[in-house]
Amino acid sequence: MRRQIARAPFVLPGLRPRFLSNPKRGAKRPPGTKFFPAGALFFALAALAFAQTNPFAGNPQAIADGQKLFLQSCAPCHGATGEGAQGQAEGMHPPDLTRGQFKAGRTDGDLFRVISEGVRGTLMPSFQSLGSDQIWRLVTFVRSLSAVSMSYTGDPAAGEKLFWGEAKCGQCHTLGSRGGRLGPDLSRGSRRNNADRIKQSIVDPNADITPGFAVVTVVTRDGQTITGVERWVDNFSVRLIDPSGNERSFLRDEIRSVKREMRSMMPGDYARKFSPAQIDDIVAYILKSQSKANMQ
Ligand code: HEC
Ligand code: HEC
């Protein structure tokens, strides 16, 4: 009996321990062990609690593994960043997973359950077939999306020089009171803006296009081709910011064709031109400026 109890905590979730459901076994029990079912129940609950404790909480490797799984299985609906879908999946209204608040509940166990079981009557499918190890990695990754972190390792002063100088970030981005308008304003941080996220935007801009910053190419009736970052595109007109930072508008009558592409206008060679330490410096400068702006 002792041995069974000792094993109870390791019963797989979802599998009822056999001694709870098999009356024959119960019948064979010697007298004086009446408390046993209660003990078994206690340990079955303990097993459940055990199963609901995230074995990977905060584990960086699990976050990285979870991100890979997320990009394969979840990004088509939730977007690569978990903020929501782009394009066709938008109509399903998948929730923003980066806010740190979930309808499903507050604990990692709640996230485990919703990923494992899905949500009935919605498009959120069950991912039980992935198995609990993978699901916990996904939970750990989803949690990491809302972690607030302004911490950085680089040198902000060195980063400032690069940002406005050699790396030319300031030609396209506003930070503080100056800078360009082609790319998103980087002045205000949000909980999505942590060092890893910013670094990824720099070294691999095409991995995740900021919503509202796709590339639009207009060919006019008189044969000009203008490429820029979208500001407004509808059936009647197109507005874009061209690479020199000027806003250009076109009416339908003037346009021969319009092409919209989910790629970044940001240079793709920063990882080659700058060392990882230099990129850390730039990230440090952005985060330091943001934490100042956020305090104002
Ligand atoms: C086919 C589209 C689709 C796919 C694929 C998908 N989801 Fe969802 N997900 C949804 C929708 C829609 C909801 C909202 C359900 C509702 O209304 O409660 C949702 C809800 C959730 C929630 C609950 C959010 C909350 O606030 O409670 C989590 C967590 C979640 N998804 C994680 C994932 C993970 C992790 C994956 C990949 C393993 C994934 N989803 C794959 C569409 C999808
Ligand atoms: C030629 C213009 C251009 C240059 C130069 C440029 N960027 Fe960008 N950047 C963009 C555009 C356009 C986007 C939006 C599309 C995307 O997400 O890649 C963007 C996106 C970003 C984002 C993501 C912002 C968000 O809100 O998600 C960050 C961070 C960023 N850039 C940082 C930098 C840094 C740091 C540099 C210099 C090392 C730099 N950029 C250089 C145009 C530029």
Image: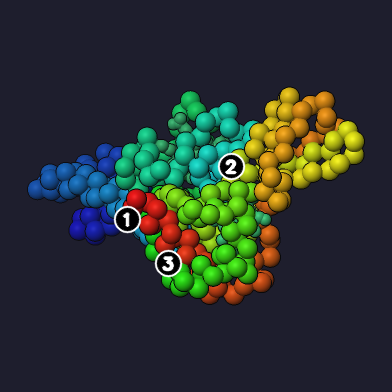
Q: Is residue 231 above or below residue 288?
A: above
Label 2, on which residue?
A: 211
From the image, state whether disc 2 or disc 1 is nearer to you: 2
Q: Is residue 34 above or below residue 285?
A: above
| Structural distance between the alpha carbons of marks 3 and 1 | 40 Å
Residue beneath the point at 58% across and 28% down: 91
| Structural distance between the alpha carbons of marks 2 and 1 | 45 Å
Q: Is mark 2 within 8 Å of ligand 2?
A: no
Where residue 144 appears, as percent x and y from the top left, is 42, 54
Question: What kind of residue is marked 1?
Answer: Phe
Element marked by disc 2: loop
Label 1, on which residue?
A: 10
| Structural distance between the alpha carbons of marks 3 and 2 | 25 Å
Residue 152's tag is 3
Left or right of 106? Residue 263 is: right
Question: What kind of residue is marked 2?
Answer: Pro
Disc with the residue nearer the chain's start (2 vs 1):
1
Find residue 271 and report its image quarter.
bottom right
